[in-house]
Image (tube, rainbow, N blue to C red):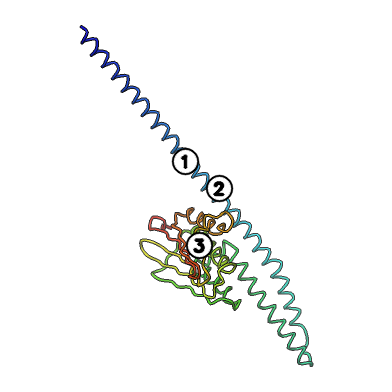
Amino acid sequence: MEISETGTLIIIITCLFLLMGLFVLSFFLVYRKNQNAKESQIENLNQALLHTQIEIQEQTLKTIAQEIHDNIGQALSLAKLNLNTFPAISDAAIQTKLDDTKDLVSKAIVDLRDLSRSMHGDKINDLGLEEAIAGELKILKNTGQFSTNLQITGNTYRLQPQKEMILFRMVQEALNNAIKHSKATNIEVQLEYNDSYFRLAIVDDGVGFNPALLQSAKTGIGLKSMQNRAALIGGIFSVVSGIATGTVITIKLNSSELLV
C-alpha cells in the first residue's frame, strides 16, 4: 500500500513537472512569436519611413529642378539673347570680352540644364541608369579637376525604375563624398550586368579612410544613407578603403532583385 501511494505521488509530481514544462515552452513560443511579429512590424515601419523619406527628397529635388529650368535657365537664355543683339564693336579687346561673356553664359545654360536633368527623377527614368550616370561624370569632368570613366560589362538590361533611381542617387552621394573628402583625381563608375546579379561600383584614387567611420553618427552619415538605400532595394552594400589606398563602394543586387 505504501509503495502504491509513493508511486502515485511520483506520477502526480511527474505530470506536474510535465505540465509546467509545457506551460513554460508554450509561454516561450508565444513570446518569441510576439517578438518576431514586433520585429517584423518595426522593420516594415523602418522600410516605410525610409521609402517616404526618399519620396519626399525626390519631390523636393523635382521642384528645385523645375525652378532652375523655368527661372534661372530662362533668365540666362534672355541674357544670352540680349548679348547676341549687341552690334559689332570696333575695339577688339571689348569685343573679345563680349564674346567670352557669351561663351560663359552659354556654358552656364548647358551646366544648369545638366544639373536640372540630374535632379529631376522623371528625366532620370527616361534616360536610364547608364546615361544618367554618364551625365554626372561629364559634369565632374567639365570642372577640369577630375578624370572620369564609366565602365560597362555584360549585356545591359533595365532594372525597376525605382531601383535605378535609388542606385543613381547613391552614385550621386558617393561622387559628392569623393569631391568633398577624397582628394581624388580619378573616379570610375563600374556597371556589371550578369544573369544572376547586377553590380555597381564607384572607385576613386583618393586618400581613403577608415571604414569603421561607417558607424560614426557624424562622419558616416553619407555612407549610412547609401547603406539604408541599398537595403531598401534588397542590395548588398560594401565599402573597401584604407588610408592612401582610395575607396571602392559596391552595391550588388542578386537575381531575385532584378525582376522588372
Res. 210 mark: 3
- Per the model, the C-alpha gap separating discs 1 and 3 is 31 Å
Rendered residue at 49%/75% (across/down): 149
Q: Residue furthest top?
A: 1
Could you say where residue 47 lies in the image, as x and y percent from the top left?
51, 48
Residue situated in front as seen by the camera: 80 or 143: 143
Q: Looking at the image, which is closer to me, 209 or 250?
A: 209
Q: Residue 251, position in %: x, y? A: 45, 61
Amino acid of disc 1: Glu
Q: Earlier in the sequence, mark 2 or mark 3?
A: 2
Give the spatial CA distance, label 1 vs label 2: 15 Å
Position of residue 82 in the picture relative to residue 168 (left or right): right
Mark 2 residue crowding within 10 angstroms, few (<14) / some (14–19) / many (20+): few
Of mark 1 and mark 3, the one earlier in the sequence is 1
Say which quarter of the image contains residue 107. Answer: bottom right
- Mark 1–mark 2 contact, CB under 8 Å? no
Residue under label 2: 49
Camera-side residue of 143 and 204: 204
Tell me the element at label 2.
Answer: helix
Of tags 1 and 3, the one toward the viewer is 3
Which disc, if any, is residue 39? Answer: 1
